[in-house]
Amino acid sequence: MDTATTTTDRADELLPSRPAKEAMSEIAGMSVFTTFAAFVLLAFPSETALPHLVEVAPVAGAEVLTHIGWGFGVYIPVMLGFYAIVIGGQLVASPTVAARTRRRLGFAAEAMAGALTPALLLILAMCVKDPTKAGSLFVVLPAAGVTFFLAVQLGGFVVFEPALRLAEAIRSRAWAASRLPALRSRSRRPAWLVATVTAVVGGILGLAVTVAIAPPPGSELVLTVVYAMFAAGLTLFNLHGLHTFLTARDRLTKIAAWLFPVSIALAVFAIAGGLIGDGAIAGGVGVMAVLAFCTLSALWPRSIPWAFGQDWSVQGAGAALAARAVARTYGTSVRTVNEVSATQMPPPTGGLRERLLAVVSALRGEVLAPVAG
């Protein structure tokens, strides 16, 4: 047996990894959360949140640019140190401690990358406001790319021990098998098509309500497009909330799934109330009509036929997205159970002769094989 091959096999056993797309998806989720939190903090002090945010973001981006250099000077060396610990720590730590260290450092690297995203967006806002500062992107973006690359590499080591992976896969398989029947009633249309139809209907509805109250001050086509874009945004938020809610495994996740869509709906309701208070009654009522239509389509029970057919409701489209995600979870968990079960050596059974043969076979595979090279 080749010594180099044996060494590589043992290194793969000591350093198990997972696909990079899983680490990238976790970093993307953290980036969305930190960006939302940062922009809420920036917009919070003012009553007119959106105009205030547009005004403050470039100023904050200029301030971030003055500090981003030393930030990268901390991020990149720290992540390289994490990488050295993950690789070299295998020589001095037990497998259990090493695995726990890999998970903690990998998660910390992902969180660091996610926390960096709002800073990059603020710098981008500054460059949009003042194009003369766009040259800074030629320095910031490569450094950010190195940071995210290291975070993805470290996030790939967030892998649990075979026993824990097997137990989690068994739980996921059982959960998915029990969840799929509840999602049997769902839309048979593609989610993008349902979202498009909902946006178009919302735009026409908003225009109809506005025209019924007062003639629009501008082009009716432009107003329809504005309402349709508004309905499309609400639909996307609702689809995300439905997908998260229907695939959640605990009560806290189900509650959190609707926090963002509900906050968006309340903000839109406040905007509509502001338009009515300023005298733009037709526009405010049109916005409320679009909001009511999109909310009704998202909350309409799947057990009751929707006016436009179950296939065209946002609730049905969200259930279809959730069903596909649960089916993927089931397939992944089944593969994990099969792979982990195949790699684990079953305990020796039978009489004394069978147990001795199992011990000799293990000694030959672990001790004699390296020497044979």
Image (cartoon, helix red, strand yellow):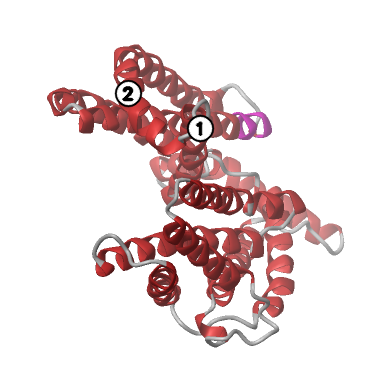
Residue 100 within the segment the image draws in magenta: yes
Residue 176 within the segment the image draws in magenta: no
| Residue found at x 69% / y 62% | 172
- The type of residue carrying mark 1 is Glu
Q: Which SS class for mark 2?
A: helix
Which of the 4 image quarters holds residue 265? Answer: bottom right
- The type of residue carrying mark 2 is Gly
User: Circle 2 sits on which residue?
Assistant: 61
| Residue found at x 79% / y 61% | 354
Residue 73 position, x and y percent, is 35, 14
Q: Quadrant of the C terminus?
A: top left
Q: Is residue 250 above or below residue 31?
A: below
Q: Nearer the viewer, residue 132 or 282?
A: 282
Tell me if I can see residue 294 in this picture: yes
| Residue found at x 82% / y 62% | 349
Residue 282 position, x and y percent, is 43, 61
Pointer 2 local density, CA inside 10 Å: few below 14, some 14–19, many at least 20: many
Residue 345 position, x and y percent, is 68, 56
User: Circle 1 sits on which residue?
Assistant: 47
Choose the circle earlier in sequence order: 2 or 1: 1
Measured in 3D between alpha carbons, the distance from the residue under mark 2 to the one under mark 1, in whole angstroms, is: 22 Å
Q: What span is in magenta?
A: 96-101
Give the main secondary structure, helix, strand or loop, of the magenta stretch.
helix
11 on left or right of 250:
left
43 on left or right of 168:
left
